[in-house]
């Protein structure tokens, strides 16, 4: 079990990243908060040894992605949420930002993941490949296809 200081440090460093990943996948504040708590409880209770800060951040990203996927695949969720109901978007000030978010959220999950990690977190394709267990060329292909789809959706 980790100390209170370690957990507080991790909260300061990774809270925004975990929340953003959850919102991109779950599009729902309540589920985002649930997964956020789950990820940090796992961190508190586990004691993996991290090589460096990047390894620790990659652990948070991987655990968050897995927790989101688990929630989305859960029996309860698949039986209780109507498909016709669209979750509300976060409050965005400008219309262009709102359109961008809608376009990103409408992309397939694997495209959203690589776009987020590359453009919002600043990871390179080889780093993303290691995190997502994908070939580097596959990551480049996913990024290229995601940008093309995003461009098409934003241009009309």
Image (tube, rainbow, N blue to C red):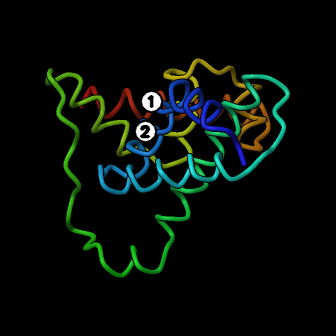
Residue sitting at 41 percent across and 42 percent down?
A: 24
Asked which secondary structure carries label 2, the reply is helix
Return the x and y of residue 118 as percentages of the image width and height.
57, 24
User: In the image shown, does 27 or 7 lie closer to the viewer?
Assistant: 7
**Left or right of residue 60, residue 17 in this image:** left
Asked which secondary structure carries label 1, the reply is helix
**Left or right of residue 58, residue 27 in this image:** left
Label 2 sits on residue: 19
Q: Is there CB contact under 8 Å for labels 2 and 1?
A: yes
Mark 2 Cα shell of 10 Å, populated few (<14), some (14-19), many (≥20): some
Return the x and y of residue 116 as percentages of the image width and height.
50, 31
Q: Which numbered disc covers residue 16?
A: 1
Number of numbered discs overlaid on the protein picture? 2
Return the x and y of residue 29 as percentages of the image width and height.
29, 49
Residue sitting at 23 percent across and 32 percent down?
A: 156
Q: Is residue 81 above or below residue 125?
A: below
Return the x and y of residue 21 as percentages of the image width and height.
47, 40
Q: Is residue 32 above or below residue 130?
A: below
User: In the image shown, does 94 or 20 lie closer to the viewer?
Assistant: 20
Q: Which numbered disc covers residue 122?
A: none
């Amino acid at each position: 079990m980790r100390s209170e200081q370690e957990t507080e440090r991790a909260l300061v460093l990774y809270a925004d990243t975990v929340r953003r990943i959850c919102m991109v996948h779950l599009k729902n504040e309540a589920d985002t908060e649930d997964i956020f708590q789950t990820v940090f409880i796992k961190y508190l209770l586990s004691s993996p040894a991290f090589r460096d800060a990047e390894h620790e951040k990659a652990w948070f990203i991987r655990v968050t992605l897995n927790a989101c996927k688990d929630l989305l695949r859960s029996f309860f969720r698949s039986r209780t949420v109507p498909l016709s109901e669209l979750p509300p978007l976060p409050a965005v000030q400008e219309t262009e930002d709102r359109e961008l978010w809608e376009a990103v959220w409408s992309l397939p999950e694997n495209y959203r993941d690589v776009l987020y990690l590359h453009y919002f977190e600043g990871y390179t394709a080889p780093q993303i490949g290691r995190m997502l267990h994908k070939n580097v060329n596959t990551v480049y292909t996913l990024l290229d296809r995601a940008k093309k789809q995003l461009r098409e959706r934003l241009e009309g």
